[in-house]
Amino acid sequence: MKGIALSVCLLAVLSVNPFAACAQTKGITQNLALSTASLGGTYYIVGAGIADILTKYIPGMKVSAIISQGSVGNPKMVDSGQS
């Protein structure tokens, strides 16, 4: 489980890093919403951890874990631009 969480975190950092570079060059903060699942569930806990790590270690980046309907609601939120 620890290896999977580390892999997910690394993937998130690598996929978001170009946005952080743009935000840092322009002197603005890039705000991102990371859709997870219900509060207290495993996906929310992992998503909140990833959001904290990205916010802490990428300058100019603020990531928030938001509660969603999980695998049913997340694609809808991405499609509508909410996440």
Image: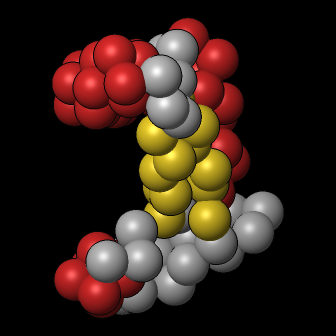
Q: Can residue 17 be seen in this view?
A: no
Viewer-side residue, 54 vs 31: 31
- In the picture, measured across the screen, residue 68 lies left or right of residue 75, that is right
Q: Residue furthest front?
A: 26
Can you give x and y, in whole percent of width and height, for residue 54 in the image?
A: 52, 25
Q: Is residue 27 in view?
A: yes
Residue at 65% over, 44% down: 48
| Residue at the image position 61 percent from the left and 54 percent from the top | 65
Q: Is the residue 15 above or below the residue 24 in the image? A: below
- Residue at 47% across / 22% down in the picture? 27
Is residue 82 or residue 5 the one in the foreground?
82
Q: Quadrant of residue 8?
A: top left
How many numbered callouts? 0
Foreground residue among 30 and 1? 30
Q: In this view, does 18 lie to the left or right of 37?
A: left
Residue that protrudes farthest toward the right in the picture? 40
Quarter that holds the C terminus: bottom left
Whole-percent x, y for residue 44 in the image? 63, 57
